[in-house]
Amino acid sequence: MEDIKLLFICPGYLIAEKILRKMGLKYQLTFVDEPWPSFDSKVELHVIKGNNFQQILTSLMETEFDAVVYLASMFSTISKKSIPKIDFEQLYQTLEFVSNKGIAKLIYASSVCVSGFVSHKVDYKPLYIPIDEEHPCLPHEPHGLVKWIGELLCEQYSRAYGIECICLRFGQLDFTHSISSTDNEDNWFKSIVRIENVLQALELSLKYNKYDMEIPFKSFYISDAETSMLQNSLDFIKTTYPEMPPPVKDLNYFANAPKGSLFSNQLAIRELGYNPD
């Protein structure tokens, strides 16, 4: 076991179970989460009940951690309308905890929703495809806005306190390798990502240190290599935008992967060493 101590915040039971199997023998893990239906008594789990999240963080102030992983992927007992507010509040409290303790790194589970092309009310057209980290983010609904604001919070805490913050813009999580999309606009933006690739990206982020800005902050799109659509990606784009399809930024991208994700993994591949299966 590596002498690296990780704090996972709100992964949800299903993801936590995968984390324990994949990373439990490599790292020393602590979890803060809603109640789990069952867990090994050897697992250090601090259970969120009501409004005790801040109390839990306070109780952990004397515990050493090398990194915090803020997932906030499952709030099973909370109203969907309350999730954005709670997600924002808990991320802020987590960043305060990290900065006050002097923890070196925070990994934030963001979402492709920050793009404005997944959950959306306005039918924007991309400036180009595949969408990458240089493309403007255009969120305008609660989930995408909260994740985008979350990234901005991470960036400012990196600037102010030197915390290494990595934001992973995950696609729709596919636990069972069975998600299939109909070929319509609402689905092609929903890039999928298998749990194995989520865990791979998390582990790679723990080792990442190639920041190219004055502050130690970085965002990456993380999805599977291909969509689950029936059509090739470019054929679908031509069908969706028949009058004026968005231009292709990298012609080789779809030449090498006709069903390639419409959210580019190329930055994560180059810099993180990400290798989507």
Image: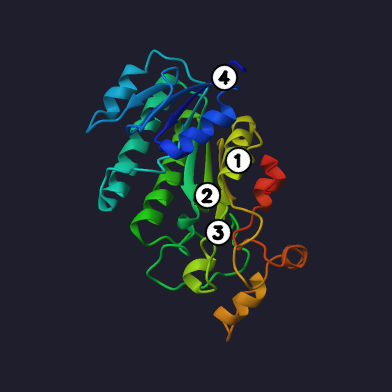
* Of 106 and 215, the residue lying toward us: 106
Residue 184: x, y in percent?
51, 74
- According to the picture, the residue beneath numbered tag 1 turns out to be 201
C-alpha gap between disc 1 and disc 4: 17 Å
Residue type, numbered disc 4: Ile
Q: Can residue 159 be seen in this view?
A: no
The residue that appears at 57% across and 52% down in the rendered structure is 177
- According to the picture, the residue beneath numbered tag 2 turns out to be 170
Q: Can residue 25 be seen in this view?
A: yes
Residue type, numbered disc 2: Phe
Given contact means CB atoms under 8 Å apart, are the residues at marks 2 and 1 in contact? yes
Residue 76: x, y in percent?
32, 44
Q: Which residue lies furthest to the bottom in this view?
A: 243
Residue type, numbered disc 1: Ala
Dot label at residue 209: none
- According to the picture, the residue beneath numbered tag 3 turns out to be 191
C-alpha gap between disc 2 and disc 1: 10 Å
C-alpha gap between disc 2 and disc 3: 8 Å
Vertical relation: 19 (above or below) 121: above
Q: Quadrant of residue 164?
A: top right
C-alpha gap between disc 3 and disc 1: 15 Å
Residue 152: x, y in percent?
44, 45
Residue 26: x, y in percent?
61, 22
Work out whether mark 4 precedes mark 3 in sequence or the reverse, and give the earlier one. Answer: 4
Dot label at residue 4: 4
Task: Assign a secondary structure to mark 2.
Answer: strand
The residue that appears at 37% across and 69% down in the rendered structure is 121
Work out whether mark 3 precedes mark 1 in sequence or the reverse, and give the earlier one. Answer: 3
Q: In which quarter of the image is residue 72?
A: top left
Q: Residues within 10 Å of mark 3 (few under 14, many from 20)?
A: many
